[in-house]
Image (cartoon, grey):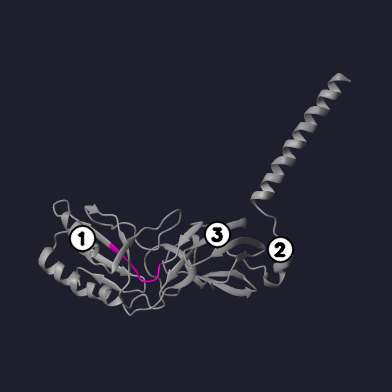
Amino acid sequence: MKHLLITLLIASTVLSCSRDSAELEAADNEIVDVSVYSEYLTGKSIATDINFMPDEQYINHNSNAPQPPLLTLKLVTKQVFPCVNYLLKTTKFIKGNELIIRFDEVADPGVCLTAIGPAGASIDLPENIDKIVLINGNKVDVYSTDINEEKITLTALSKSFTNALYSKTFRIPKNSFAFVCGTNTGNTHLYQDFLTILERNTSFKEFKFEGEGRVPYPVVSSGHWVNHPSKFFIYSNRAEFEKLDNILNTFSSEKIEKNSGVTIALYGWNNSKYYSWD
């Protein structure tokens, strides 16, 4: 009898721990009623997980013509394919404030760009969306979404095949620009020299992206002997910002020697780009 009581106590403790564990798991990964999305299920699926993130893009990114950024959801396969231009085909639905994306297939591009890479797609992300639903076959992943002028925040409610690369992403502030500079080891002063020009202009006010989140501008230059941290500004006068094109050209011709390993780039919020090497 004594042994039986001990056995029952142990079993009771194990069941209690298992129940607590299950409750914690349910709290972290909400159970989704797939039947709510049954009209969007086709049974077709793709054999790869998906990484995604909010991203502000420009409709014509190859042009310097001023244009406001468009908020999108960037989707890429975790699997790498033999051509960098494989296509991730999706179908998009809007249901109230929900954005529903169904993954239909990974398509061969026909003409292969000879570099490996994931398949990708970009989906417009409306500002009023508060839930993103991602469907692959009979799998349904759900994320709550908080979109405001400063930041986009994603919270996984249930996930099995997707991964949000960033839980928080900063928006590109209106009338902002980034100063991005790289130098060689013997001419690092050029970074501060041009930064001083920006700091002395009363139409420009430096700011920082405060708190957690992916910054939408380059945070540091790349490919130089010395990669300097980027600086970010808000301009109060658009004409003063546009003058930076000529100011940078003059600075480059007078201060930057050819093949000296120095580059300066100014990236504007509206797709304006000024380069020291133009």
The reply to whether residue 161 is visible in this rendering is: no
Instruction: Identify the element where label 2 is drawn.
Output: helix
Q: Nearer the viewer, mark 3 or mark 2?
A: 3
Disc 1 marks which amino acid? Thr
Residue at image point 40% right, 60% down: 215
The span from disc 2 to disc 1 (Cα, nearest Å) is 58 Å
Identify the residue at horizontal 12%, vertical 69% (top origin).
253
| Mark earlier in primary sequence (3, 2) | 2
For the question of whether residue 175 can be seen, the reply is yes
Q: Earlier in the sequence, mark 2 or mark 1?
A: 2
Location of the N terminus by quadrant is top right
In the image, which residues are magenta? 173-179
Which residue carries the number 1 mark? 196
Q: Residue at x 74, y 65 (%)?
A: 35
Neighbor class of circle 3 (other Cα within 10 Å; few <14, some 14-19, many 20+) is many
The amino acid on which the numbered mark 2 sits, given as a three-letter code, is Val
Task: Using the image, tell me which numbered label, if any, was put on residue 154.
Answer: 3
* First of labels 1, 3 by sequence position: 3
